Image: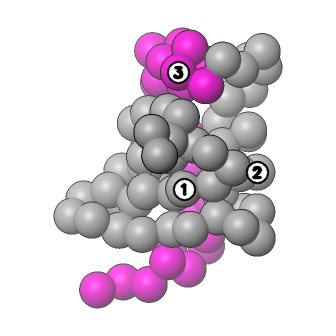
Amino acid sequence: MKNTNELLENLDKLHTTELGVIRIKKNLSLETDIAVDWCREKIKSANAVISRKGKNWYVSVDGCVITVNAYSYTIITAHKDKQ
């Protein structure tokens, strides 16, 4: 299994679709239009817990979970942690 550094090493490839931006902003109640940059900063933070399950990376940080496709580095969604 590949280590979590792979996601961190490829943060420059992180992106999402127009609908992804809308979904992320809605799910997290964000006021920013730069959702990808917001997610990138959260993923880089020291308290981020990164795990990979199948084709996706899951990043738990500051009460939210960010889901990233492990092959394309597309942010699929982000939502508030249910715990």
Residue 44 in magenta stretch: no
Query: As displayed, is residue 39 above or below residue 73?
Result: above
Q: Where residue 19 sits: x, y (%)?
A: 45, 15
Residue name at image x 69 percent, y 49 percent: 62
Amino acid marked by disc 2: Glu
Residue in front for this viewpoint, 24 or 81:
81
Residue in front for this viewpoint, 69 or 28:
28
Name which of mark 2 and mark 3 comes first in the sequence.
3
Split into 4 quadrants, where in the image is the N terminus?
bottom left
Amino acid marked by disc 3: Asn
Q: What element carries label 3?
A: helix
The answer for how far apart the CA atoms under marks 2 and 3 are is 17 Å
Residue that mark 3 sits on: 27
Q: Is mark 2 on a helix, strand or loop?
A: helix
Query: As displayed, is residue 37 above or below residue 56?
Result: above
* 8 relative position to 17: left or right: right
> Which of the two discs, 1 and 2, sits closer to the camera?
1
Amino acid marked by disc 1: Ser
The answer for how far apart the CA atoms under marks 1 and 2 are is 13 Å
- Magenta segment, principal secondary structure? helix
Name which of mark 1 and mark 3 comes first in the sequence.
3
Residue name at image x 66 percent, y 17 percent: 29
Residue in front for this viewpoint, 55 or 29:
29
Query: As displayed, is residue 72 above or below residue 64?
Result: below
Q: Where residue 81 sits: x, y (%)?
A: 50, 42
Name which of mark 1 and mark 2 comes first in the sequence.
2
Disc 2: CA contacts within 10 A as few (<14), some (14-19) or many (>=20): few
Magenta extent: 1-28
Disc 3: CA contacts within 10 A as few (<14), some (14-19) or many (>=20): some
Residue that mark 1 sits on: 60
Q: Where residue 15 sits: x, y (%)?
A: 55, 39
Residue that mark 2 sits on: 41
